[in-house]
Image (cartoon, rainbow, N blue to C red):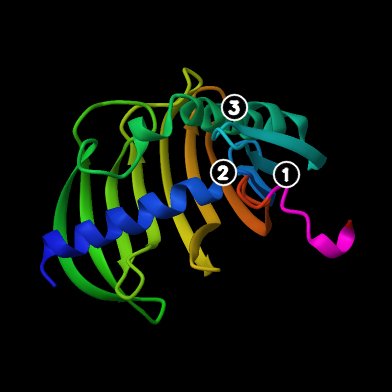
Amino acid sequence: ADATEILDSYLNAARSQRDRLHGSVAEMSIDAEVPRLNKTGKLNALRRISRLGRMTYDILRFEGDNSVKNQVIARYLSAEAQVRESGDASMAIVPENYKFSYKGRRELDGRSVHQFELKPRARRKGLFKGNLWIDARSYLPVREAGRFVRNPSIFIKSVEFTRDYRFQDGLALLDRLDTVVETRVVGPAHMTVHYTDYRFEPRSVDVGQIPTDNQ
């Protein structure tokens, strides 16, 4: 397959899965550290994506230093939710938003992947300059990595990240996010987020279908 066919297959796969993530809940565990202050924090939360794509968080517990919670974790979550609110289409990895440059076929963690270099067409929140690795069989994303071209908050100078996905029920689900956030207040902060226990609401077409033997 040539680069255009690979890209088309990826765009089709990504489009079909985007709506399936609406109405999902995942558990998040966030480990953050601020080396300059020698402080750490660990937060557990539920991330909800509503039917309409709105992202909210339910904080379950936090251990550690409150400055890490307030200066790093809370600001990051708020920025992520804001970017999400601005509309999926404006930050989707699609040709309207990015220039794709094919870098060839690679091995990544024992998986055969296609690598594309991404350059955003505009300096918009949520867009990044970096790379995308696509599974050579399913054409779903395996990894995205790069640096945001616009900072999500005035308190943040730069954000570099690596997002790793895992496959479940034909979906690419965010598995792990590694981030280095350069903050204006406390210097660099490192954050690792693990996503587990994805749960999906039944789709609206399935709701209201009552088996006859229950009546």
Q: In which quarter of the image is residue 141?
A: bottom left
Q: Find residue 25 and report its horizontal and vertical position in percent.
A: 68, 48
19 and 149: which one is in front? 19
Q: Label 1 vs label 3: CA separation? A: 14 Å
Percent across and percent down for residue 171 are 49, 62
Could you tell which of marks 2 and 1 lies nearer the N-terminus? 2
Which residue has dot 2 on it? 22
Residue displayed at 56% across by 43% down: 22
Q: Which of marks 1 and 3 is in front?
A: 1
Q: Name the residue under label 1.
A: 46
Segment colored magenta? 207-214
Q: In which quarter of the image is the C terminus?
A: bottom right
Residue 209 is one of the magenta-drawn residues: yes
Question: Measuring 72% from the left and 44% from the top, which residue is drawn there?
Answer: 46
- Helix, strand or loop for the magenta stretch, by majority: loop
Q: Is residue 15 in sight in this rendering?
A: yes
Between disc 2 and disc 3, the foreground one is 2
Q: Residue at the location (81% across, 61% down)?
A: 212
In terms of sequence position, does the residue under pointer 1 or pointer 3 come before the other?
A: 1
112 vs 190: above or below: below
What residue would you read off at disc 3? Answer: 78
Q: Does the image show residue 42?
A: no
Q: Is residue 107 above or below residue 182?
A: below
Closer to the camera in the image, 198 or 192: 198
Mark 2 falls on what kind of element?
loop
Left or right: residue 79 compared with residue 69: left
- CB-based contact (under 8 Å), mark 2 and mark 3: no
Q: Which amino acid does label 2 sit on?
A: His
Q: How crowded is mark 3: few (under 14 residues within 10 Å), some or many (20 or more)?
A: some
Q: Mark 3: which secondary structure?
A: helix
- How many C-alpha atoms fall within 10 Å of the one at disc 2: few (<14), some, or many (≥20)? some
Determine the image quadrant of residue 140.
bottom left
